[in-house]
Image (cartoon, rainbow, N blue to C red):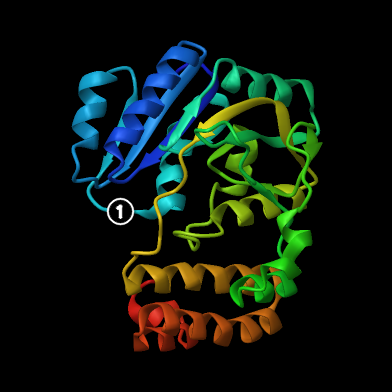
Amino acid sequence: MTTPPETAVSIIITNWNTCELLDGALDAVALHAPPPDIETLVIDNGSTDGSPAMVGEKYPGVHLIRNTENLGFARANNQGVALARGRHVLFLGSDTIVQPGTVQTLAGFLDAHPEAGAASCRLMNPDRTPQMSCRRFPRLRDALATYLSLHWLAWRYTMKGFDFYRTQAVDQPAATCLMVRRRLLEELHGFNPRYSLLYNDVDLCERIRARGWEIYYVAETEIIHYGSMTTRSAPPGIRLEMYRNIIEYFRAHRGPIAQWMLTPVLAARLLLLTRSTIALKLFRPAVEDGQG
């Protein structure tokens, strides 16, 4: 079998029931990032809102993967990486609108900066105000401040005073728009599937930096980002999985003491949010509930 030729960029969009937003995202990609130098893959996580049919009908050039269930962000993106032919892979949110030159500028930056393993750009609200999309890697004190709602104590983590119009090395930009060298992704085996909902991009950036690569915020280009769907109405089971992801990240990257200190804080927060004893499951390994 002949191996398909390498292209410049593979854009990977994961989707779960965001049909209208996904349509807008793909329309912008088709206009500003066309083939043959750029390929687009949509990984659908069992949507029931007509998303797969819309992609198949309106965007026949898009490589569509139809999962029968929601595999989560990490596993779905890894499916895309396994199929990608691009020299670089752009993880792109289904709630984004790329601007003219966005994809080409990020790819050109990685090509021109051999020390760069990944790059992101400015995320703009629809009203053209910038979003705070970069963070430093969180320490335990940052997590405690954040999840105790003492956000003013986490100013270092949130990078208060960030210059949105200066290209600079950063710790962790959001995977809403994150371009990574494909061969680096292959070496790292992509996203860690243990982080199904949260901290998957933070973990990936930690591992990129641990390999000696830089990650850059590129101020010369931008995208429009409508913002993630709110989690305020998320059912208790989804919230439980989100909080397990947080605990797993701090256990893996900050050690068992961080896990022990953070677990009761998150359990109390989950109890207040859900009014459910499901919060007590944070004190048990996820494997006990068939999720590990």
Residue 9: where, in percent of width, then height? 55, 23
Does residue 21 appear to the left or right of 3 in the view shown?
left
Does residue 93 appear to the left or right of 264 in the view shown?
left
Q: Which one is in front, 173 or 131?
A: 131
Amino acid at the residue labelled 1: Asn
Q: In which quarter of the image is the C terminus?
A: bottom left
Q: Which one is in front, 199 or 129?
A: 129
Residue 187: where, in percent of width, then height? 63, 44
| Location of residue 184 with respect to 58 vertically, above or below | below
* Count of numbered circles on the image: 1
Q: Which one is in front, 115 or 241?
A: 241
| Location of residue 257 with respect to 149 vertically, above or below | below
**In this rendering, does residue 3 appear at all?**
no
Q: Which one is in front, 289 or 172?
A: 172
Asked which quadrant contains residue 256, the reply is bottom right
SS at circle 1: loop
Residue 23: where, in percent of width, then height? 32, 28
Residue visible at 53% across and 51% down?
191
Residue visible at 76% across and 31% down?
165
Residue visible at 35% across and 35% down?
21
Does residue 55 appear to the left or right of 38 in the view shown?
left
| Location of residue 113 with respect to 79 vertically, above or below | above
Q: Quadrant of the N terminus?
A: top left
**In this rendering, does residue 244 appear at all?**
yes
Q: Which residue lies furthest to the top in this view?
A: 36
- Which residue is disc 1 drawn over? 70
Residue 255: where, in percent of width, then height? 70, 77
